[in-house]
């Protein structure tokens, strides 16, 4: 009983019942429509045939009288057709024809109108099995003679019977076919849904590595499973990131917190002067600011990755952002003894958030200023910002001539709180590249860390240092520089109007 209830409550059964009911109703409607119209059409043809026979017999009666009419009817009766004829005298006695019996009520109505009657053919006993239907006209002739002309409806009855049998066979076949289709469809759908439910339960129990089955036939279940698998991949990635963040926070923030606690405890144990106490508080305040900045950076990364920063991607010129940010850092680089250069080869239009992109570029330049110095001051520090473009992409590069990053560490260094051994002497929390990567991903771009000499148009081959390469898709309406500027101008006009 439970299994039956489960089957009857499935969507497949309900859909099969709806389709079966709809097709049955449509089939019955078509049968009634075709049957009625066929009857009307055949009745009109029968009436036309009867009227044509009446016209011929009327001409014979006009020429030869009752005797000629009788001769004409006898000749027609002997020919093989479905026409009916009957001539009676003034007393109702049979003179000639092919009808053995006709109700008296029908014979009394001899006004020439069309009548549908039941009769017994000549030569057959008067029983219910031998009765047939016909369309007739009855006329009263001079001398109280009566003439009946009609046509048998056996062909119509046979055709309607064939239509009824065809409808019955169609309905039975449709029900059987619907049942077979429902059986296999229901089994297949229930099996797929059961597999999805089982996989979902495993995932809910904590197996985040579990995935929904994809058969590969491309149906709606495969599309649903594929989308859910992508969502599960993202959830697993976020959960793994959360775990790593928790571990990193516990590890990397433990040291400054412990240092702050030790400094406070030492201050409480010692009889410190006012200047020493102020110095202790200032150091503690610096440590506190670093912790706050770290948490703010983590919050910023989380918001960017979740897409909840309120960022609105609008058409903008990437070259304007590069100019503005580089203009701010040129004096800083000059004071720090760094040779800073900017090279803008193209002015691509992209869909982006100005504030986030500016912060990402600023982080790249700050990383180059802090970590991109040649070892042992063997050469003058160099930072080069290059903006170029292809037909589909905008490419922003920030290069330095420092020690660079080993190829094995380039992917790992973009994770949160990752700091290489060579950079631990400099202040920082290891969150800069994580934020940059989050911003680039939000803009459907890619962050690549490569050797500074890998680009064909940057520096000499084999040059040391790191090249941070940001690849962003160009605005969809931009196809070449002219159209890009046109898209930019339209966006600017729209913003100015609003």
Image (cartoon, rainbow, N blue to C red):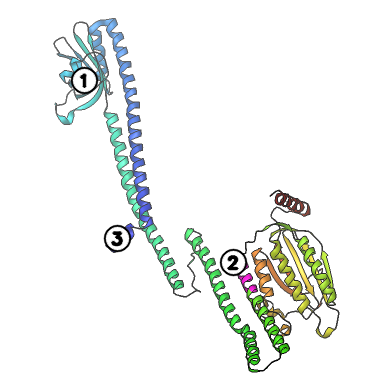
Numbered range of the magenta stretch: 296-310
Percent position (x, y) of residue 404? Answer: 76, 79
Task: Tell whether position 301 is magenta.
Answer: yes
* Residue under pointer 3: 4
Earlier sequence position, callout 2 versus callout 1: 1
Percent position (x, y) of residue 472? Answer: 70, 63
Q: Element type at marker 3?
A: helix
Q: Residue 411's image quarter?
A: bottom right
Nearer the observer, disc 3 or disc 2? 2
Residue 415 shows in the view: no
Q: At 19% from the left edge and 9% from the top edge, which residue is drawn? A: 145
Quadrant showing the N terminus: bottom left
Label 1 CA crowd tier, 10 Å (few <14, some 14–19, many 20+): some
Q: Element type at marker 1?
A: loop
User: What is the spatial separation of the Cα atoms under label 3 and label 2, in whole angstroms?
Assistant: 45 Å
Q: Which residue reaches farthest bottom? A: 270
From the viewer's perspective, is residue 94 above or below residue 363? Answer: above
Mark 3 near mark 2, Cβ–Cβ under 8 Å?
no
* Residue under pointer 1: 98
Nearer the observer, disc 2 or disc 1? 2
Q: Is residue 450 left or right of residue 114?
A: right
Q: Element type at marker 2?
A: helix
User: What is the spatial separation of the Cα atoms under label 3 and label 1, in whole angstroms?
Assistant: 63 Å
Nearer the observer, disc 3 or disc 1? 3
* Residue under pointer 2: 306
User: What is the spatial separation of the Cα atoms under label 2 and label 1, in whole angstroms?
Assistant: 95 Å
Earlier sequence position, callout 3 versus callout 2: 3
């Amino acid at each position: 009983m439970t299994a039956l209830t489960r089957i009857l409550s499935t969507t497949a059964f309900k859909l099969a019942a709806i389709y079966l009911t709809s097709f049955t109703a449509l089939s019955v409607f078509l049968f009634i429509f075709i049957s009625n119209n066929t009857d009307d059409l055949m009745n009109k043809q029968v009436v036309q045939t009867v009227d044509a026979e009446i016209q011929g017999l009327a001409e014979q009666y006009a020429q030869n009288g009752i005797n000629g009419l009788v001769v004409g009817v006898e000749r027609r009766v002997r020919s093989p057709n479905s026409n009916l004829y009957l001539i009676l005298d003034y007393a109702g006695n049979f003179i000639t024809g092919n009808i053995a019996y006709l109700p008296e009520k029908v014979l009394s109505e001899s006004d020439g109108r069309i009548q549908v009657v039941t009769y017994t053919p000549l030569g057959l006993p008067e029983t219910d099995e031998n009765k047939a239907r016909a369309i007739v006209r009855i006329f009263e002739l001079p001398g109280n003679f009566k003439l009946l002309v009609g046509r048998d409806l056996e062909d119509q009855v046979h055709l309607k019977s064939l239509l009824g049998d065809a409808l019955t066979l169609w309905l039975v076949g449709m029900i059987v076919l619907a049942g077979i289709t429902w059986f296999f469809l229901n089994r297949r759908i229930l099996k797929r849904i059961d597999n999805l439910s089982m996989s979902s339960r495993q995932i809910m129990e904590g197996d985040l590595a579990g995935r929904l089955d994809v058969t590969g036939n491309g149906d709606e279940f495969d599309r649903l499973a594929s989308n859910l698998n992508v969502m599960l991949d993202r959830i697993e990635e976020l959960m793994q990131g959360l775990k790593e963040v928790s571990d990193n926070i516990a590890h990397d923030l433990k040291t400054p917190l412990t240092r702050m606690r030790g400094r406070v405890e030492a201050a409480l144990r010692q009889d410190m002067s006012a200047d020493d106490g102020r110095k202790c508080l200032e150091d503690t305040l610096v440590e506190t600011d670093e912790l706050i900045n770290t948490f703010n950076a983590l919050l910023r990364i989380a918001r960017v990755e979740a897409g909840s920063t309120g960022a609105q991607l609008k058409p903008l010129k990437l070259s304007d952002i590069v100019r503005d940010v580089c203009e701010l850092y040129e004096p800083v680089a000059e004071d720090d003894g760094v040779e800073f250069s900017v090279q803008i080869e193209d002015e691509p239009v992209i869909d982006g958030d100005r504030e986030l992109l500016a912060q990402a570029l600023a982080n790249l330049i700050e990383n180059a200023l802090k970590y991109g110095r040649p070892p042992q001051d063997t050469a003058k520090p160099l930072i080069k910002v290059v903006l170029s473009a292809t037909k589909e992409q905008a490419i922003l590069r920030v290069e330095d001539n420092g020690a660079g990053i080993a190829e094995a560490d380039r992917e790992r260094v973009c994770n949160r709180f990752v700091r290489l051994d060579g950079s631990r002497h400099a202040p920082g929390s290891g969150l800069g590249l994580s934020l940059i990567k989050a911003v680039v991903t939000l803009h459907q771009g890619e962050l690549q860390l490569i050797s500074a000499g890998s680009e064909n148009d940057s520096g000499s081959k084999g040059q040391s240092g790191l090249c941070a390469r940001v690849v962003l898709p160009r605005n969809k309406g931009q196809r070449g520089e002219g159209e890009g500027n046109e898209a930019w101008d339209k966006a600017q006009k729209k913003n100015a109007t609003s």
